[in-house]
């Protein structure tokens, strides 16, 4: 029997452990057929296998996705090979390990300012998702790219509409269309504004590089800005939220304990159960199953990272190979500036509802909280 991939966050680890042991046929909630691969060895190999493509033009027709317009669709999550490498070479230096080290003072400054504002919160419960987990990454990534702060709430709402999209729900479809329309207009206008009045930010740098080398189209520039802001924001917000929620339910963490516990905590809090979907460029055999050309393949990061066969090898939560997450270093800096510092500042913080009553978004794409109500304590 073909299983439908579930959307409930609380079941995510058990579900993905159940995908291991074979390459399985499944369906997305909207009914689209996919293959799920969940063993560590298989996922690690396929993440950099050129027989699988991120380009939706390689789809045999079973994958609908978001149907983004060209202004948003010409991004790194829909490209391979030379095309992908050309744009990644432009974006990559700003997110390298060396650049991340230089970014550390900015992250600390923004985190400290956000905590100082949180200190002034009234005694009743605060929503840490809104007051801490969203502002820090939004301000960091926004300052890097040159995205104004007044756009941050709209970006969060648009991201939520995308990751919770249900193809079987007309209302969800209307929210998605509205979100895509807003994002297209917002980032097209932002790039145009930077072209007219460049600033000291990455979008302005990319515009200058593109004008000099004439290597990027307007759609590619808009798509790059869109992807870097939205993907970076979505992942960092919910990674921080999931980490703090888990730790509040288990007694917190000290600054001394954080380095030793960090890896396991990060993996368990990962909001992204699957790597970005891929399409078979040619017929291939994985785990004894024949995957036809054009079929959609989902690589389970949860299944791989929790696989006993992993045996201490590196986590795959940020990917592997040419599509390794550009924002991994930035996400690490944000998490390190937010999570241990929160428990150092608020050792008496507690959830105002039982952990079992926290509400997660209904999504197979990304597991994040709707809200994180916390009393900060004395």
Image (cartoon, grey):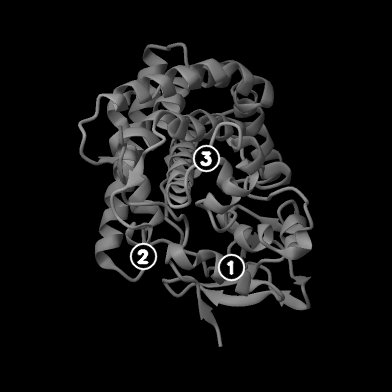
Q: Quadrant of the rendered structure where residue 185 is?
A: top left
Query: Quadrant of the image for the N terminus?
Result: bottom right
Of marks 3 and 2, the one in the foreground: 3
The tag on residue 16 is 1
Sequence-earlier tag: 3 or 2: 2
Residue on which disc 2 sits: 166
Q: CA distance from mark 3 to mark 2?
A: 36 Å
Residue 68's x, y, as percent?
A: 42, 50
Residue located at (37% from left, 25% from top): 115
Q: Is residue 257 left or right of residue 340?
A: right
Q: Is residue 129 left or right of residue 98?
A: left
SS type, badge 1: helix
Residue 9's x, y, as percent?
A: 44, 62
Extreme residue in the bottom direction: 1
Is 189 above or below relative to 230? above
Sequence-earlier tag: 3 or 1: 1
The residue carrying pointer 3 sits among few (fewer than 14), some (14 to 19) or many (20 or more) residues within 10 Å by Cα, namely many
The residue carrying pointer 2 sits among few (fewer than 14), some (14 to 19) or many (20 or more) residues within 10 Å by Cα, namely some
Of marks 1 and 2, the one in the foreground: 1
């Amino acid at each position: 029997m073909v299983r439908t991939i579930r959307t409930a966050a609380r079941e995510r680890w058990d579900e993905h452990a159940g995908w291991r042991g074979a390459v399985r046929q499944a369906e997305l909630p909207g009914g689209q057929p996919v293959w799920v691969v969940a063993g560590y060895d298989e996922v690690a190999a396929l993440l950099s296998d050129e027989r699988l493509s991120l380009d939706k033009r390689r789809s045999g027709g079973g994958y609908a996705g978001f149907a983004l317009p060209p202004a948003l669709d010409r991004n790194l999550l829909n490209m391979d090979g030379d095309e992908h490498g050309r744009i990644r070479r432009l974006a990559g230096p700003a997110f390298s390990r060396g650049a991340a080290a230089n970014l550390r003072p900015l992250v600390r400054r923004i985190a400290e300012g956000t905590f100082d504002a949180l200190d002034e919160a009234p005694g009743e419960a605060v929503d840490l998702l809104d007051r801490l987990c969203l502002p820090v990454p939004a301000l960091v990534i926004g300052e890097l790219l040159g995205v104004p702060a007044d756009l941050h709430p709209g970006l969060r709402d648009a991201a939520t509409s995308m990751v919770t999209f249900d193809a079987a729900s007309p209302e969800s479809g209307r929210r998605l269309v509205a979100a895509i329309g807003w994002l297209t207009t917002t980032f097209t206008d932002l790039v145009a504004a930077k072209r007219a009045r460049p600033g000291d930010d990455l979008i302005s740098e990319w515009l200058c590089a593109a004008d000099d080398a004439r290597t990027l189209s307007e759609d590619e520039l808009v798509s790059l800005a869109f992807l870097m802001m939205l993907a970076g924001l979505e992942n960092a917000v919910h990674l921080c939220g999931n980490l703090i929620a888990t730790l509040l339910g288990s007694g917190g963490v000290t600054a001394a304990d954080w380095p030793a516990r960090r890896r396991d905590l990060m993996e368990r809090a990962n909001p992204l159960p699957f790597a970005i979907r891929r399409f078979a460029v040619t017929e291939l055999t994985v785990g004894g199953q024949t995957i036809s050309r054009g079929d959609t393949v989902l690589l389970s990061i949860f299944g791989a990272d929790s696989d006993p066969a992993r045996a201490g090898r590196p986590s795959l939560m940020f990917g592997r190979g040419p599509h390794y997450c550009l924002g991994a270093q930035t996400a690490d800096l944000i998490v390190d500036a937010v999570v241990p510092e929160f428990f150092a500042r608020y050792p008496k913080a507690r959830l105002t509802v039982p952990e079992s009553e926290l509400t997660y978004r209904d999504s197979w794409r990304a597991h994040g909280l709707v809200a994180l109500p916390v009393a900060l304590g004395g």
